[in-house]
Image (cartoon, rainbow, N blue to C red):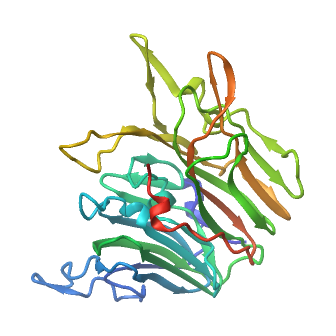
């Protein structure tokens, strides 16, 4: 049995490992080799704290680690734009992760969305797995085990070079991992205009044995009235027409109720929140990434949500599909909607996994 970091109560009983970290000053995580680069202040005085000038089209290896081990924490920060016309860096940078010599990634998502920051825009998040703090301090505490090798890459699909990319990968090496250890996976999807009456697919093609641990959704509403009546459905191990797990609405899946709203002077006021296992951390109707004298900053309302199935994992033995309906309601009752949805699905499973559908080109990922 192996005891890993989790709660404060577990700290006295942790399985002993070898603690290591990778960053721009120690790209291999080698013991006793951190912070060696020199600056004008001298050797080992912040000589090379970040990756500089990552070129358009370039893929850099952030970390390559021989196992067995577990990545316990990842911290990243970078600019969210490089010019007034090139302001979707967090959607243009693609994060990928490979376990144990895979050819195809187990994790593939735009950098911002992986950290629950869609729309190319950061927001503050205080949750058990993802924490985002000022200013664009992107933190993951998702546990990522590997038995032979872990490789994490970043591809720059942005139009310009990324001047400075700061990061750190904290991990422990262990003598062994249990045979039943499952591998972490995450996959991004988008429908810029959902099909009328057809459920949006959050995850599909998941084959094998594992458990689903989380959902992030970035929603741009394109129609009037309340948007959140669609039910989140989990089709488990052969479910076809009807799912085994079906919620009561999108707002309910993310832990809210009654449209997340309060009312002041006859106006409905959106209420965002962030908690350990679920949240609605982002709402805006304005594009504050760009300032222009000749147009205002209005844009379709943007909403970001996360839900972690840490205390309520969804297990599957053969396959899993996750969907959400686009259903709204107004004074005339329920109606089918068409909106702009993107999402990240997070899960663990035994390898091998099915190859993900091709990630859309960057222009198809940009927010409205």
Residue lying at 50% horizontally and 78% vertically, measured from the top left: 152
The furthest residue to the top: 265
Q: Position of residue 213 (x, y in %)?
A: 66, 55
Taking 86 as reference, is 116 above or below it?
A: above
Taking 168 as reference, is 221 above or below it?
A: above
Taking 262 as reference, is 69 above or below it?
A: below
Q: Nearer the viewer, residue 212 or 361?
A: 361
Residue lying at 45% horizontally and 28% vertically, measured from the top left: 270
Image quarter of residue 190: bottom right
On-image quarter of the N terminus: bottom right
Apparent side of residue 167 relative to residue 363 in the rendered image (left or right): left
Q: Nearer the viewer, residue 24 or 44?
A: 24
Whether residue 63 is visible here, answered yes or no, is: yes
Whether residue 312 is visible here, answered yes or no, is: no
Q: Position of residue 176 (x, y in %)?
A: 67, 82
The furthest residue to the front: 294
The furthest residue to the left: 40
Residue lying at 30% horizontally and 40% vertically, measured from the top left: 297
Q: Position of residue 19 (x, y in %)?
A: 48, 78
Residue lying at 71% horizontally and 71% vertically, measured from the top left: 182
Apparent side of residue 76 relative to residue 144 in the rendered image (left or right): left
Q: Nearer the viewer, residue 11 or 341?
A: 341
- Count up the numbered dots: 0
Q: Position of residue 196 (x, y in %)?
A: 68, 41
């Amino acid at each position: 049995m192996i005891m890993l970091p989790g709660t404060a109560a577990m700290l006295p009983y942790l399985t002993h490992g070898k603690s290591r970290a990778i960053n721009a000053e120690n790209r291999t995580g080698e013991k006793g080799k951190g912070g060696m680069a020199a600056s004008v202040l001298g050797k080992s005085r912040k000589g090379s704290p970040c990756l500089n000038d990552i070129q358009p089209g370039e893929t850099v290896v952030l970390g390559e680690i021989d196992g067995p081990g577990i990545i316990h924490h990842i911290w990243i920060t970078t600019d969210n734009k490089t010019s007034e016309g090139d302001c979707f860096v967090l959607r243009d940078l693609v994060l990928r992760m490979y376990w144990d010599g895979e050819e195809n990634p187990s994790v593939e998502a735009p950098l911002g969305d992986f950290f629950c920051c869609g729309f190319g825009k950061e927001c503050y998040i205080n949750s058990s797995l993802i924490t985002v703090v000022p200013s664009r301090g992107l933190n993951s505490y998702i546990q990522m085990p590997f038995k032979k090798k872990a490789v994490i890459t970043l591809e720059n699909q942005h139009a310009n070079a990324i001047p400075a990319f700061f990061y750190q990968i904290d991990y422990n090496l262990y003598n062994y991992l249990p045979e039943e250890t499952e591998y972490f996976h995450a996959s991004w999807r988008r429908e810029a205009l959902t099909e009328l009456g057809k459920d949006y697919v959050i995850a599909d093609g998941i084959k094998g044995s594992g458990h689903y641990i989380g959902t992030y959704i970035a929603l741009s509403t394109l129609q009037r009235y309340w948007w959140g009546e669609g039910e989140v459905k989990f089709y488990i191990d052969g479910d076809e027409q009807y799912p085994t797990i079906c919620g009561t609405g999108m707002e309910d899946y993310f832990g809210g109720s009654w449209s997340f709203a309060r009312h002041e002077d006859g106006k409905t006021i959106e209420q965002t929140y962030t908690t350990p296992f679920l949240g609605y951390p982002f709402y805006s109707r304005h594009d504050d990434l760009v300032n222009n004298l000749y147009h205002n900053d209005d844009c379709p309302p943007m909403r970001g949500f996360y839900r972690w199935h840490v205390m309520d994992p969804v297990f599957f033995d053969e396959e899993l599909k996750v969907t959400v309906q686009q259903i709204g309601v107004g004074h005339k009752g329920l109606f089918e909607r068409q909106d702009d949805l993107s999402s990240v699905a997070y899960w663990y499973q035994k390898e091998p996994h099915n190859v993900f559908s091709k990630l859309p080109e960057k222009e198809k990922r940009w927010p409205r």
